[in-house]
Amino acid sequence: MPSYDVMPNMELYQPVQVEDALALADRFAERGWLVGGGQDTYGWLKDRAKSADALIDLSAIESLRGITETADGIEIGALTTLTEVSDSPVIRERFSVLSDAAGKVASPQIRNIGTLGGNVSQDVRCWYYRRGLSCYRAGGNLCYADTPEAMNREHAIFGASRCVAASPSDTAPALVALDATMVIRSSSGERTVSAEDYFIGPAVDILHTTVLRPGEILTGVRIPNTWANATFYFEKVADRNVWDFPLVNIAAAFRVNGGTIEDSRIVCGSVECTPHRATSVENAIRGQAKNASTAESVATLSTDGARALAHNGFKIPLMQNLVRRAIAA
Amino acid sequence: MTTHIGIDFTPPDVAGKVTGEIKYAEDYKAEGMVFARLLTSPLPSGRVTSIDTSEAVRMDGVVGVFTADDLPPVPPPGNPALASEYVTYVGQPILAVAAVSEEIAEEAISRVRIGFERRDFTTDPLNSLTPGGANAYPEGNVLVRTEEEGPEGTPIRGAEIRDIKWTQEAMDAFRSGREPVGAEFTTEWVFGDLDAGFADSAVVVEEPFVTIGYPHHSLESRTCMAYWENGRCYFHGSLQSQSAVNNGLARMLNIEPGNLVFINEATGGGFGSKIGPYPFMAITGNFSRMLNRPVQLRITREQEFYIGSARSGMQGWIKVGVKADGKVSAVDLVIVNDGGATGGGSGNSSAGHVSIVYQPESMRYRGISVYTNTTPRGAQRGPGQNEMASVLAPIMDKAARELGMDRVEFRRVNAVDSNGWYGNQSGPVTSAFMREAVDQGAELFGWNEKINQPRRNGSKIRGVGTGVGYHGAGSSGYDGLIRIGTDGRLYIHSGVGNLGTYSYAGTCRAAAEALQVPWENCEIVRARTDRHLPHSSGQGGSNTIFTHTRTNWVAAQDAITKLKEIAAAELGGDPSEFEIGDQRVFRSSDNSQGLTYAQAAQRAIEMGGKYSGMEYPEDLNPITERAVQGLQGSGLIGVSRDNLPHEGQAPGILVGFCEIELDTDTGKVEILDYAAVADCGTVVHPKNFDNSMRGGAVWGFGMSAYERHVYDPQNGLPANVGLYQSKPATYLDVPTLTKAGAVNIPDPQNPVGARGIGEPTQGAAAAALSSAIADALDGYLFNRTPVTADMIVNHVAGNNYNTTSLKTNTF
């Protein structure tokens, strides 16, 4: 093996207008690499496990930064840092599940650099895949993680389809819980998709984790007021309290009236390649009291259909416990 | 009255570390320097069948290729700098390419074509010991020492590789948590009557256990830069030790030690992995000589994982017998070490830990260290002792519980004192006051209050634990060298390395104390061989404080003798009529008659002979002889070999106490409180002592609850080559405030009363935390280190996580 840990030769573009970035993204398509905070990017490139001809550095595009109020909620620029999301008064006041989630990402240093767009668009953390092995997700014809002897403690318990990598994002479950909309632009215009549809599993497309296609840029996230000031819950369980990806996390929004749950969105991360909505639980608790008794009665529902690998069976009781805590809180 | 010992001071390199001005090996550049990069093995085991570098060397900017053929052959079981025929772990260096830039060198490496022939491999020593199991080396699977083993971290001499397999019955028993009857071992000792010991026992506890290896992940990767001038090699490296490495490094470069200038101002962590020169240092120096250009070989973070070595993992079985009064009467211990690609394990040190901390009346140890196709293993902070402390604490807790005895009282009953002994009843201790440390620690922590507090709050359970860290902490027989300049200043020449513990500075305080020189008038001379540094111990084994307060003390005593002789010669009378004080030597009966140190130094130069280093004792090490020769005629030279009395093991003992809150829903453990009290003789530098307590504790918490060393048995690939994957504890995983204290009873065999304590700081915290985790779960034994959140969740959920099935990996 070479030593790596040095950047490969590649062209660098640093547009300051989103239109220029879109033109570059269109021009280079698969041969271009979009970079925001770079916290996912530089590992790939310096390890030489992935490569590109051109690096399109979006970080100088000011219009992609910041949090603005809209008629129906807020819009967050994709380059807004996780620290800014975590500290934003409007998000803390109305959508605290997102600020809580952003505040739990990685470490303070990484949150100061890492962006919301990057956090939701980052690639999976399967260590076999990131090592550069030729697995299904890397275009090969093998999964190294889904075998009886594999070291797969952090992998998925839902949605295996040739690949068992899990979504590593802390903010993605929060955005799904908030029913956010992802704003995607390309040189041919803008399209929007719900956060729930933004993330895709291996059964849909094993080479990508989002619907973003070459030439497209995630420019922002819109959060409607639908769930503003709801009863929120976010919890992340990781080995360490800082600089770690979740073993399991949970983001939940409850609309509660007189102690009764009228509606809810309960989403877990790191149990599937995409944020995983516990819809059966949401249905089961609708109209029920938001209390420990309800929580206890439905927690095991959340993991119906889960399939444990050799070393990640703990995620099943852990996810149940987090769902229970979210409802009982 | 002490003026320096037990008093805080600021070591001189602290400011440079805070400001970033201090230089590490990677910061040095030389004119014409080229950059070397390593090509390493992608396979865990195989044979190199061909190497084609033709395309690489044709690239513009490439200046050379360096392979095993350019170095003397290293027969097994040595750890060669570059693999020749066989590769035995992923990441093993095979060749180096030098170019005018790292990028070009990297590109050139990608154009080297290597042919491999795959071999079977193993990542688990038990698989290799099983009949039919793969051997990590063609020659076999077990390291057998044919002579005495050297000190930790030094090359193994008198060793061979043998092929040893256990019977299937023995292996099945061991994997099931029972004694592997009939199994073959390579180390075995016993003392006392084991059968009688167990027969006398009121309680017998029998458990299997597993501890994993841990990579060092030194923050400063082991980069080197070397260049040659007039036959001398100037070598910038990253080692824990300074003078102790000279001879070994010179041998690697095939030069006389006097032609080596080793420069190492600061070291960004070593923890045992940089005690002596590591094989890869041979590449930089010899490549530089081949190219006749300065060469820098920068080691990447991932390569630091591969070649930076790791702690040896253990799979073991222990049976402990305890009498009704709590006294441990018998211990039967079996350890299979995972020796990685270098084969060595620390099982004997693990057994030593058990023997000194619990002073059993009888004990048997049987051990074997097995090669695996994983990273090289080496000394890591308390090798053997600390992982044993971590996994042993809950097992001993179980014995205490079954006996109905308080766990702290159990430690107290078995505590080592100054009549104690170490290991295979191999020798006495210099002094020991563990019982006092237990009492002081229990008070500091509030043990009696904490064990009686409410335990459960919802899903959260309080647990308290205690544990003991131990390491042998002192050596002797090295040299001290000081110089009083004509400016009156005291120059303390130190061959002690700067591994970040500041013991190099603390030990120099003994010379200042003896000569009664204010610290501002002292200068520590260190960091470069050509600054004339004396022969010093390697900075490993927590020995430096004990060892080099002695050397600096004896050098100062030599200087005091010479000061008095010079004064007598100058002022008349007998040297015994003079004394020192206030940086003068003066007549006791009339202190107006005297010489300043500056004047005495001038007179020493004029008098020559032993006074100015023209003559020196015959028992000095050649390294010190060369250092004195370099200082001849420059002042009053104080130089001496440490011939002070020294009998027995100088123990460093730390008793730790930990309080946690364990969340049964998430498996998370929050450390609420930690207190530790040391028995390390006189504390030389209180602030540094506190820092050591904190730093060691953080790593100890990591050992018991966070860190990982994971290999995929399917392909021999490691999963934790980076820091974030290895998960050392961070500042948010540990308490902001911890408490530390010391018994502070002087050791009679050290002139300032000091013993070392560096390594036990990790072991005590690791043991106290694992004890607390078990306590929170009503004494449940995971019998493994670390215990991570997934294991706790599985246990609480009744997921039948199999703790009796020995596994080397954490998941």
Image: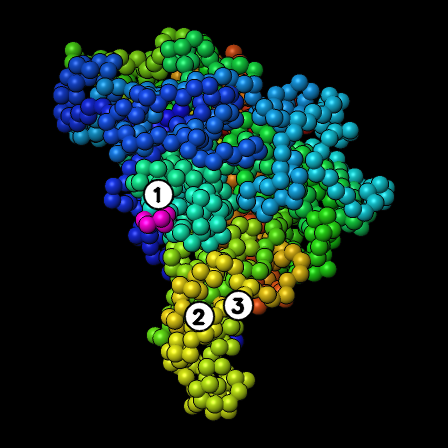
Label 3 marks a residue whose chain is B
State how far apart marks 1 and 3 are (Cα). Answer: 35 Å
Label 1 marks a residue whose chain is B
| Disc 2 residue type (three-letter) | Met
Residue drawn at 75 percent across, 35 percent down: B206
The residue stretch that appears in magenta: B229-234
* Magenta segment main secondary structure: strand
Task: Pinpoint residue B810: horizontal percent, then vertical percent.
Answer: 56, 29
State how far apart marks 2 and 3 are (Cα). Answer: 10 Å
Q: Which residue is mark 2?
A: B614
Q: Which residue is mark 1?
A: B225
Residue B162 higher or lower than B235, as above or below: above
Residue drawn at 18 percent across, 14 percent down: A26
Q: Is residue B202 visible?
A: no
Q: Which mark is residue A121?
A: none
The secondary element bearing badge 1 is classed as strand
| Disc 3 residue type (three-letter) | Pro
Q: Give the quadrant of residue B606.
A: bottom left
